[in-house]
Image: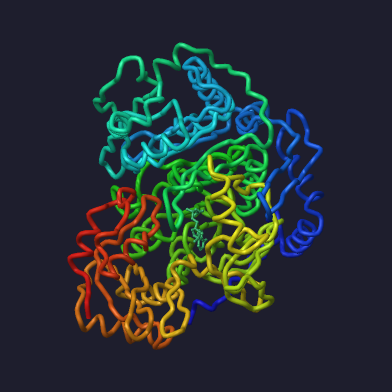
Amino acid sequence: MTASEIFPVPAELAASAHVNAARYQELYDRSLSDPEGYWGEVGQRLDWIKPYTEVKSTSFSGDVKIRWYEDGTLNVSANCLDRHLATRGDQVAILWEPDSPETPHRAITYREMHGEVCRLANVLKARGVKRGDRVTIYLPMIPEAAYAMLACARIGAVHSVVFGGFSPEALAGRIEDCGSACVITSDEGLRGGKPVPLKANADQALSTHAATAHVHTVLVVRHTGGKVEMTPGRDVWYDEECAKVAADCPPEEMSAEDPLFILYTSGSTGKPKGVLHSSGGYLVYAALTHELVFDYRPGEVYWCTADVGWVTGHSYIVYGPLANGATSLMFEGVPTYPDASRFWQAIDKHQVNIFYTAPTAIRALMREGDSPVTSTSRASLRLLGSVGEPINPEAWLWYHRVVGDGRCPIVDTWWQTETGGILISPLPGAMALKPGSATKPFFGIKPVIVDAEGVPLEGEAEGNLCIAESWPGQMRTIYGDHKRFVETYFSTYKGMYFTGDGCRRDADGYYWITGRVDDVVNVSGHRMGTAEVESALVAHPKVAEAAVVGYPHDIKGQGIYAYVTLMEGEEGSDALRAELAKWVRQEIGPIAVPDLLQFAPGLPKTRSGKIMRRILRKIAENDYANLGDISTLADPAVVQSLIDNRQNR
Ligand code: 6R9
């Protein structure tokens, strides 16, 4: 199987990259043996108002305390903007590519962005927003989203970005949980040519939830010009308010440990958790990983396709790139609008050098065949990245061969909302690549694979992934619920951070994330990674995407239920079912063959592209009454269609 192929570091890259193999080993060893020394030096990449003298003060036991650069003070927005003005004030900070290629793009320089952020910071102050207050940002992918984040950082307010695709219900819950008194939104968003009624959603959230009555200000960006209702006193136009204030706003001096933002993320149980990140440690980690993992060089155009409502957008569209003085491309639209060539055309248009996207997008585009890609040049591309879920070797190889013309290394970056930045990933000048493996830990990261009893496993091993030592980008707590923080992450395996992911380490010390451990099925006593079965199914030429879950089975304990989306133009049939069963048997073995296989034209996905297996599990279990909250799905209608076509035999 080609998936076992190894892709060596291109010689030219080994010579020119920030980090080569020898340097990686040297720095990695040092970062573990002398974390104070290593992180103390690295922290100096930021501008501190008062330099830190204490680097690390962390404990994973008892009450769990995580503090980095504790006595230092800084301002995050000054680090992302002001300090670049003297050297690269006229360089583009944000390159904005709109939903439609017909709409003109925007190029905002560091100097312009500094003015925009200062004005907005002054507007927030004029509306009574103070240091420590929470501000909810509910915006589409427009530059104002980045301005809003940095304006909060400038005055010491804590932002909570809520993905523009979330429902009024979800928005209200998040406003309520953190008690934010100000919401920044826009008239409408635009995705794939369709308007998204953001202001109307915000109105609905605020009018139907009494617990949000403390919201005193809704700041509305004029984006599409769509008609909206304005509640006098509460609602004001962003442009009108910005015109009234000065374009200068001195940055607030913040402690390294003051919170920078809250970002809500779902766990396996309960309501979304407000993951809280710090100012100093978070920015050090986001900036360092952005520079080294993407081997970013001054002047390059870097494009991360994530949404700012997702942690990837926080760390790798806004904070990391801007702290590094990079040019960060922000895209408003979707990969398939107006057609499946959109990404590749935008790469040519803006001469993008580094491109970072998610496996779900890669698979969706792969399904459209090679010609939408090969009709473009992509000669500017140098490096590709992947994030969000395990990338199956089939998609990896296509991304490498077709999108990257076989010349661009792929960094498969494993991390989480909780980790703030990338923890396991190739450094492209240092690691040979194995398709489907996130390869090796970043500096300071000490992965530990444990068995079900929590016993650390050495060498080649498979088990649950924990991290033994803290790193500066780690979340500090769950907003308002430190007890839940300790219970969720530090009580399963004492003294270690538990990631919730399964992982295998091979003979070369490479890490392979096998998916959430809650997605593992046990068939007749055999442990089976659902991702493994999915990967096998997707490797079949007629399959575009697959999601696999376990369901109760009388004899085997658990059976395997597979939902399969076929390539455009393919028809589901019993013959194809049998063909796929045979295929999986060949790829992995008889224990991996799905017991039930349903052809599904669409899968339930969050707007960030993650398949919601929780829902698929319920459908597989015939438990339709307890589907839970489906409001966060990109297309809630797929759920009924899946139920209607459920397989029983
Ligand atoms: C950044 C982000 C975190 C979960 C994580 C894991 C999965 C992310 C991955 C990956 C395999 C990768 N995940 N990147 N699995 N390989 N390169 O996605 O954060 O939304 O919090 O999700 O996503 O299961 O635990 P978040």
**Rendered image quadrant of residue 217:** top left
Residue 111 in the figure: left or right of residue 141 = right
Residue 36 is situated, as x and y percent measured from the top left of the image, at: 80, 49
Given the current orientation, which residue lies at the most extreme top position? Answer: 244
Above or below for 507 versus 203: below
**Rendered image quadrant of residue 202:** top left
Viewer-side residue, 234 vs 628 = 628
Residue 124 in the figure: left or right of residue 64 = left
Residue 623 is situated, as x and y percent measured from the top left of the image, at: 27, 65
Viewer-side residue, 57 vs 72 = 57
Question: Coloring scheme of the render?
Answer: rainbow
Q: Is residue 97 visible?
A: no
Viewer-side residue, 200 vs 329 = 200
Viewer-side residue, 409 vs 580 = 580
For the point 30% across and 61% down, which residue is it? 603
For the point 52% across and 50% down, which residue is it? 417
Above or below for 323 versus 351: above
Given the current orientation, which residue lies at the most extreme left position? Answer: 644
Q: Is residue 255 visible?
A: yes
Above or below for 153 versus 553: above
Residue 10 is situated, as x and y percent measured from the top left of the image, at: 63, 65
**Rendered image quadrant of residue 463:** bottom right
Residue 509 in the figure: left or right of residue 526 = right
Quarter of the rendering occupied by the C terminus = bottom left
How many callouts does the rendering have? 0
Residue 392 is situated, as x and y percent measured from the top left of the image, at: 45, 69
Above or below for 354 versus 590: above
